[in-house]
Image (tube, rainbow, N blue to C red):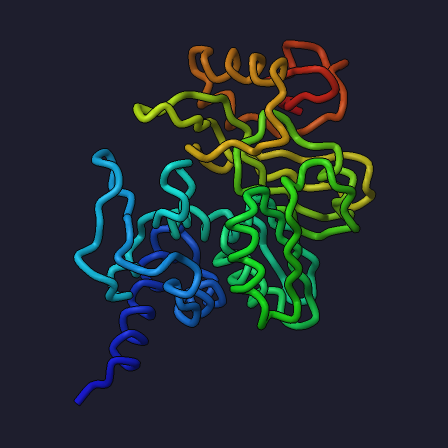
Amino acid sequence: MITRARELEIVRRAYAKQVTHAAGSTDPRLEAALAELHREDFVPPGPWELMRFPEGYVRTPDNDPVYLYQDVPVALLPEKGLNNGQPSFLTRLIAVGLLRPGERVVHVGAGTGYYSAMMARLVGRAGRVVGFEVEPELAGCATRNLASYSNVDLVLSDGSTTALEPSDVILVNAGSSRPADTWLDALRPGGRLVLPLTVSYRTDQQLLMTHGAVFLITRDMHGVGYAARCMSSVHIYPCAGLRDEISEKALMKAFGERGFQSKLGKVSRLYRTDSITEERCWVRAPGWSLAYD
């Protein structure tokens, strides 16, 4: 007779395989990390509110953890629209960062720590993950949830103004209207910044959310410039400390132009200046620009 523990192990392995496939990843380490993590340890006690589009939150019948092993967000603070995000989307962001054993990773928007724990498994004991979370309740949960991870630190902060130690990967799990200087400064040569650049909107429930595109910003090996590539579209919670009004207006104009998607595909460089000529730029705002060469 199959035990309950064995049943959940099978469910987690099926979930991990489905999520990594949906994320477009072929990295077996990602699948293994998802299969080993217990999602129920990183969300409030059940029954749970699962986000279904377009209906909104749908409550599970009871607190059976099996319900959590679906590719859906799970409510953490539903009154604020804060969730344990969609696994395939976050797995894709992590995959984009190309985390390697021994690397130092910064996770901005750590929530309750589920995806920080996933990244901690990828970098191993020789690596380190530093998670930033601005919501005190979520940061407290993350600190408890990650207590057994010797290679993870959790900081109560929005992560956009704190000076960072040199890092190999910075993953921003929130919508910014510009790249933070602190993130760009912290990237080691060859370091990767996974950055959602977004504009704001109000949901039907009058919650502030953002939409836009995820960019992979890679610091050149000689350390003086940055390659840029658009990876996907995104709808995401706003980054509390990095909603710059002028940059947001510039992004809104860029996203609103005819054929913006094909133009996004041509973006190849991030410049920490607005002196690049307008015809070379997809977006240009005070102190930064994304350009075609």
Which residue is at a point 70% across and 58% down the rendered structure image?
A: 104
Q: 59 or 21, which is in the foreground?
A: 59
Position of residue 94 measured from the top left corner of the image (x, y, whole percent) = 52, 52
Task: Between residue 290 and residue 187, name the one nearer to us.
Answer: 187
Quarter of the view holding residue 241: top right
Left or right side of 160 for 282 = left
**Placement of the C terminus among the 4 image quadrants:** top right
x 63%, y 26%: residue: 178
- Residue 154 is situated, as x and y percent measured from the top left of the image, at 64, 56
Residue in the foreground of this view, choosing between 243 and 269: 243
Q: Which residue lies furthest to the bottom in this view?
A: 1
Q: Quadrant of the N terminus?
A: bottom left
Q: Could you say which quadrant of the image residue 152 lies in?
A: bottom right
Q: Is residue 184 above or below residue 197?
A: below
Residue at horizontal 74 percent and vertical 41 percent from the top: 162
**What percent of the width, then of the height, locates residue 48?**
28, 54
Please state the horizontal and vertical placement of residue 41, each as a whole percent of the image.
42, 65
Question: Viewed as shown, does residue 93 lie left or right of 267?
Answer: left
Numbered-mark total: 0
Q: In which quarter of the image is residue 8?
A: bottom left
Residue occupying the point 39% across, 52% down:
87
